[in-house]
Image (tube, rainbow, N blue to C red):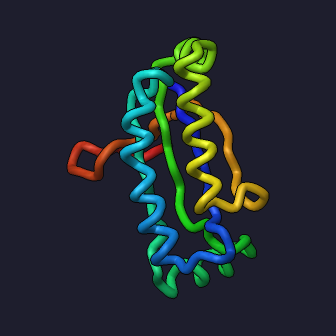
């Protein structure tokens, strides 16, 4: 499978709570667009408001955390391209973009396609150590 990863920063005029509410309100639109785009799965991961985040970033000299991550899965690059090649897929993509303008700072967000390489699943007694 192919996964789109969207590391999101909120617009400056939105508080973190307002951003999270608005992002959750975006989810039904994504669900309605999924068939046209041939998307298989959609997940929002909202960044926790915890002092651990800046501490973790500082431990590696990293930039501040994003406000969240969206992940969208397709069966393949061909499936993604096929969805985007249709009139319905293009209209769905435009609808999503238009809605995202209300809560995402595009200039400071990052969007890219990935391929997963699972190293281990859920921890348990069968998990083997990497050697």
60 left or right, relative to 118: right
Q: Give the vertical position of 112 relative to 46 (above or below).
A: above
Against 41, residue 97 (above or below) is below
Q: Position of residue 78 (x, y in %)?
A: 58, 12
Rendering quarter of residue 90: top right
Most foreground residue, 122 or 87: 87
Between residues 35 and 65, which one lies in front from this camera angle? 35
Q: Position of residue 119 (x, y in %)?
A: 45, 40
Residue at the (52%, 34%) spot, across then down: 116
Residue ID at (62%, 43%): 97
Residue at the limit of the structure toward the right, as seen here = 107
Above or below: residue 121 compared with residue 114: below
Query: x, y percentage for residue 89?
Result: 55, 22
Q: Residue at x 68, y 81 (%)?
A: 58
Residue 68: percent from left, percent from top: 53, 62
**Residue at the image point whose x is 59% and y is 62% from the top:** 103
């Amino acid at each position: 499978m192919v996964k789109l990863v969207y590391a999101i920063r909120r617009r400056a005029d939105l508080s973190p709570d307002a951003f999270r509410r608005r992002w959750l309100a975006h989810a039904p639109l994504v669900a309605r667009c999924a068939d046209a785009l041939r998307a298989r799965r959609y997940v929002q991961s909202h960044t926790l408001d915890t002092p651990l985040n800046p501490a973790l970033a500082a431990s590696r000299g990293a930039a501040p955390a994003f406000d969240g991550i969206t992940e969208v899965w397709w069966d393949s690059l061909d499936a993604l391209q096929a969805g985007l090649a249709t009139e319905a897929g293009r209209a769905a993509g435009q609808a999503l973009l238009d809605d995202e303008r209300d809560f995402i700072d595009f200039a400071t967000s990052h969007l890219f396609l990935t391929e997963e390489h699972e190293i281990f699943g859920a921890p348990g007694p069968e998990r083997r150590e990497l050697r």
